[in-house]
Image (cartoon, rainbow, N blue to C red):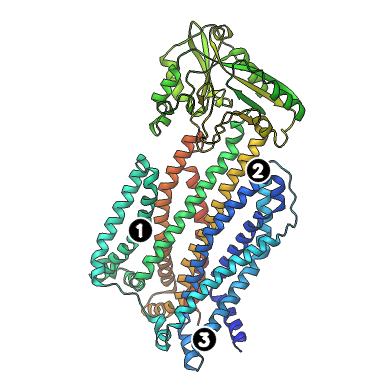
Amino acid sequence: MLNKLAVRNARRSMGDYLIYLVTMAVIAALMFAFDSMIFSKDLVKLYREGGAMMAVMLSLATFFIIFIIAWLIHYIIRFMLEKRSRELGTYMLLGMTKKQISRLFMRENGVLGTAAFLLGLLPGLFFQQVLTSIIYSLFDKPYHLSLDFSGWGLLMTVCLYFLVYFFALLKNKKQFKKMNIHDLIYLDKQNEKLHKKTRKLSGIWLIVSLVYFAIFAVCLFTGAITLAAALPMVLGLIVCIYLFYIGLSGMLAAYIHRKGKRIYKGAGLFLLRQMASKIKTMSFTMGSLTILFTAAMIGCSIAMMFNDFQKTELDARLPFDVIVFSDKTDDDFSAQRDILRKENQVKEELVYRIYENGNDPVNQYLYDHLPYFDHVTPMKEKKPEYGQGEYFDYDTYMKLSDYNKLRRMLGYEAVRLKEDQYLIQTQDRDRDTLEGFASSQTLAAGGKHLRCQGISTIPFSQCGENGADYVLVVPDSAAAGMKPFYSLLAADLEGDAPQGLQEKLSALQDYEDEETGDMKMDITWGFGTNQVISMEDTVLVRTNLLEETRFVITAVSYPLLYIGIVFLCVAMTILSVQQLGDSAKYKFRYRVLSKLGLTEREINRVVLRQLLIYYLCPALAAAFLSGAVSVFASHKFIFYTGTHTPVLYYYGVSLVLFLAVYLLYFLATYIEFKKNITQD
């Protein structure tokens, strides 16, 4: 009998809480898709080490997500208990024991959760195939959609999903046991109360939170937030988000208590009393939703940053198929060249030297004028005698003949220099600063005074190979009067380099101290000012490093996107269910408005305004907070990586996607809400 009743009630709940059912099905689909990717044979074949990293990152993302899902399930079950409390109280009056009613309620929700999980399996399998095909396309590898059902992925999803469901039900079961018939009958009639003392403090909390938001934004954009202070500042921000809503809610209640002028304009009294009746719940819920929305948009923005870098800048960081560094000025790279010929057919290769002139005017100019050094302490001031820093000990020079051979290898035309000219080869992000040097100073090199002929910003491996950030190209006659500084080997291969070539070439060098990680060289090695993603190594094999870096980027961006989608769905579901669950209570109130003379169109406007208040409060606050953090992060990402994307691009796209999902949930809630208050 209980089983039949549980199934019948679960069916009814599916209709009443359809948005919740759909959201749980989407979450189950996403969990199954990403969990299946952890055990995907296709990804393991694509790249073993990267696949392992992807598995770790997805597992960490899932670990964080299960807590949010647990909160969602607990919230919805608690909400359903409140809405059905009179029904459950009636069961108790009819003679059912608490234990029987508790089992009935748990079975209902178990059926609801199982239905959502089963609905999500097939879409989850489809999502997994789509995600895998996207990853393959990032690596320019062919992939054909095929049924890759992962038993381990399914087992992991089942265990996590139902374990979270079980503990959420268990917690609600304990709360249910403490209730009596009176509590159940009148549970849905209780309104949240705000004491007079709390109303007086609300203004203080509101001011405190707004002042903290302003201080946080100022500290963020002025660079006053250090790594040590970041966690306390973020925790303070979270606390102030809740204080903001407590203060806002209290101010609203105080305004109603004072009978403010706007109360009697239009449906103001009705809407304000609607909000005041749920003051406490609204404060905590709105604060939690704001945090979820903020985290979702920040996560999406950061994921887009890495994805954009992967599409636009990654290839440019590795222009040569192979480039090898040596601190020996007479190194002929015979061992490395033998390996290259053995492993792959070499189309063209060049062994050449980088020169120094015993001084560093360009380095000093960059230390003084490059914006990068406004945010960091130059390594030159703290580097050991034989270590590494942003730049080499001396300015780096290259012969024009070698430079043109390298340009030809990359597919560019040769350049010409007069005997009294030099050229700066640098990265685009440093161009403006070096233009200042070129226009203000002449260059003394090889016993000659040279003037700048121009600046080139073609991709040229300048993270410690062809200079650090820059190399000065001079006529061969000027280079003849300089001292060789270090040696390089650049090679152009037929096709892609084989797997493991990077490791084989690196094994021939032993520069890095295993204990300290410092570079043991005869010179101080410069790695440039590229940050976040920097190709700094003494051996660079394009194909090997591209695959490795792409997997690292994907391993970061995919989990962030995963977390953002789940957070957004959870928050939107809570907003929608909160309103739709109360629609039965509002039915009587809107009928009263109708009897008072409001037309159906006017009532629909009131409904729209009521829903907009609930939907816009957390959305606007989250848009402001996530906007500040995302724009700051975008600025730093662009500054340190050298991408050419506008600062507002990442946040703008994230906001548009967020608003699209937001609008879908809002429209679904609005349509269903109107239906609930008009049907008999």
At 57% from the left and 6% from the top, the residue drawn is: 477
Q: Position of residue 425 (x, y in %)?
A: 54, 21
- Across and down, in percent, residue 618 comes to 41, 60
Q: Secondary structure at mark 3?
A: helix
- Up/down of 590 relative to 429, above or below: below
Label 3 to label 2, Cα distance in Å?
A: 55 Å
| Figure quadrant of the N terminus | bottom right
Q: Which residue is mark 2?
A: 138
**Percent of width and height locating residue 654:** 50, 50
Labels 1 and 3: the sequence-earlier one: 3
- The CA distance from mark 1 to mark 2 is 40 Å
Find out whether the residues at labels 1 and 3 contact each other: C-beta distance under 8 Å: no
Label count reads 3
Sequence order check, earlier mark of 1 and 2 = 2
Residue at 67% over, 51% down: 132
| Location of mark 3 (residue) | 99
From this viewpoint, is residue 212 visible?
yes
Q: Earlier in the sequence, mark 3 or mark 2?
A: 3
Amino acid under disc 3: Lys
Mark 1 and mark 3: span between their CA atoms?
39 Å
- Amino acid type for the residue under numbered disc 1: Val
Task: Answer few, some or many: residues within 10 Å of disc 1's Cα (few below 14, many 20 plus, some between 14 and 19).
Answer: few
Label 2 amino acid? Leu
Q: Which mark is nearer the camera, 1 or 3?
A: 3
Quadrant in the rendering for residue 20: bottom right
Q: Secondary structure at mark 1?
A: helix
Along the line of sight, the residue nearer the viewer: 205 or 236: 236
Residue named by callout 1:
239
